Amino acid sequence: MTVTTATTLSEQKAAADYQTFCQLVYRHVGLDLSAYKRDQMERRLRVMADRVGAKTLCDYWAKIVNDPPALAAFLDRVTINVSEFYRNPDKFEILQQSILPLLLKDKRELSIWSAGCSYGAEAYSLKILLTQLTPGVNHRILATDIDIRCLERARKGCFSADDLREVPDTLRRRYFTACENGFQILPALRQGLTFQHADLLRDAFPERIDLILCRNVVIYFSDDAKNRLYRRFFNALRPGGYLLVGNTERIFDAQEIGFKSPLPFFYQRP
């Protein structure tokens, strides 16, 4: 057998191993790994498999499928739960000074969606902004994520000091109380805020949303999955509504979809 033939067979085995792993994950937990960029996702998965001594991805699945803590850890690593209050503070400054005031000219109560909310810091940050801008108005904020454990943590509203490092001291004193593990957000900040499980690649989207934030969620998605997602976001927005993406993300076919881009990383449905 030539080296080239051996390499080809090895690549075919690896591809079949990855495909079978994806099918097993989808069948058991509903996560569609085929929508992610294969090279990046496969590298991450094989590193995770190697750490537990699994020679193949299918061996890795056999090790974690009946081990709830290991399966939960796998899902946490794959879905990339990273967040903090006022992440990318410059974007929250734009929201506070420009985008939200523009939206509030048209409507007294806004509908906002934090898509891929992780453990809730972004959604609560939005709630604080709106509370400052329009005291007493109960805006509706939907916060969704695929990770059930993160959603449970978000509903509790307890955060570490690191999570709050971008929160000014005045706001920290006003909206949080000290607790055993850090800081507890005030119960009043939870009014109008709904945390809900959702898979952006499979589930139905809400309609006539004023503002959608989907940041650093799609960086590992395939180009086709991104395109479908951004088109669905466009349809979920009301005319005049905005989509904010992450600082490393672009919608390259924004004009084709129908978006305008009045500011970097902000896309508006005319």
Image: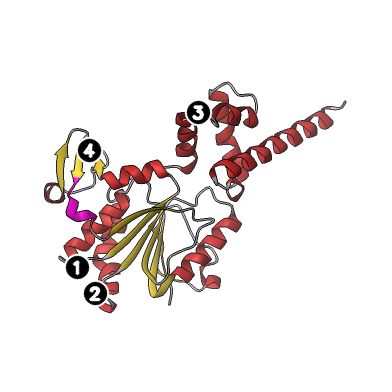
Residue hosting label 3: 67
| Residue at the image point whose x is 47% and y is 65% from the top | 233
Give the mark toward the camera: 2 or 4.
2
Give the mark toward the camera: 3 or 4.
3
Are the residues tagged 3 and 4 within 8 Å (C-beta)? Answer: no
Residue 161, numbered circle: 4
Give the mark toward the camera: 1 or 3.
3
| Residue at the image point whose x is 53% and y is 47% from the top | 220
Q: Which residue type does callout 1 highlight?
A: Val
Q: Which residue type does callout 4 highlight?
A: Ala
Are the residues tagged 1 and 4 within 8 Å (C-beta)? Answer: no
Assess disc 4: are there few (<14), some (14-19) or many (≥20) residues with their C-alpha within 10 Å of its C-alpha.
Answer: few
Q: Is residue 189 magenta?
A: yes
First along the sequence among labels 3 and 2:
3
Quarter of the image where one finds residue 148: top left
Residue hosting label 2: 108
Assess disc 2: are there few (<14), some (14-19) or many (≥20) residues with their C-alpha within 10 Å of its C-alpha.
Answer: few
Residue 137, numbered circle: 1
Real-space Cα distance between discs 3 and 2? 48 Å
Real-space Cα distance between discs 3 and 4? 31 Å
Q: Main secondary structure of the magenta part?
A: helix
Q: Is residue 235 left or right of residue 188?
A: right
| Residue at the image point whose x is 55% and y is 51% from the top | 221
First along the sequence among labels 1 and 2:
2
